[in-house]
Image: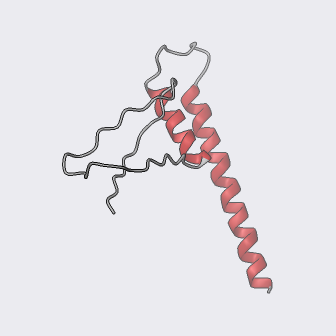
Amino acid sequence: MHAHKEKITIPADHQLTLRLPDNFPTGPAEVIVLADSSAEKRIVKLAGILAPDKPPPMHIDQIADSLQEFRQERKQRFEKLGKNQRAQEDT
């Protein structure tokens, strides 16, 4: 069995073109597309903000807003880890 893995960004039109290496075998194959977790979607969102099609209005700071989302999610994850650890210590 041969496999080829490639990180991609799904475009707005949801259409992909994939070029496989020349040494990849020809014939029947199966294609599976896996979407990443919500945290990684936010990373893609942040990347889109850094290179938008058109600039946002001057009063909106999309990068700061996205970074705040990361901070909140990080805080929630650490709080959850702390609760899980305390629960394990109690047992």
Residue at image point 38% right, 50% down: 29
Residue at image point 79% right, 87% down: 91
In the image, taking residue 44 as reference, residue 21 lies left or right, namely left
Give residue 87's quadrant in the image. bottom right
Number of marks in picture = 0
Q: Residue furthest bottom?
A: 91
In the image, taking residue 84 as reference, residue 37 lies left or right, namely left
59 or 15: nearer the viewer = 15
Q: In the figure, 78 relative to 45: above or below?
A: below
Residue at image point 71% right, 69% down: 82
8 or 90: nearer the viewer = 8
Q: Residue furthest front?
A: 27
Q: Residue furthest left?
A: 22
Q: State how the image is colored.
A: secondary structure
Q: In the figure, 43 relative to 4: above or below?
A: above
Residue 6 x/y as whole percent:
36, 47
Residue 65 x/y as whole percent:
62, 32
Q: In the figure, 39 relative to 9: above or below?
A: below
Residue at image point 63% right, 39% down: 68
49 or 14: nearer the viewer = 14
Residue 79 x/y as whole percent:
72, 61
The quadrant of the rendering that contains the N terminus is: bottom left
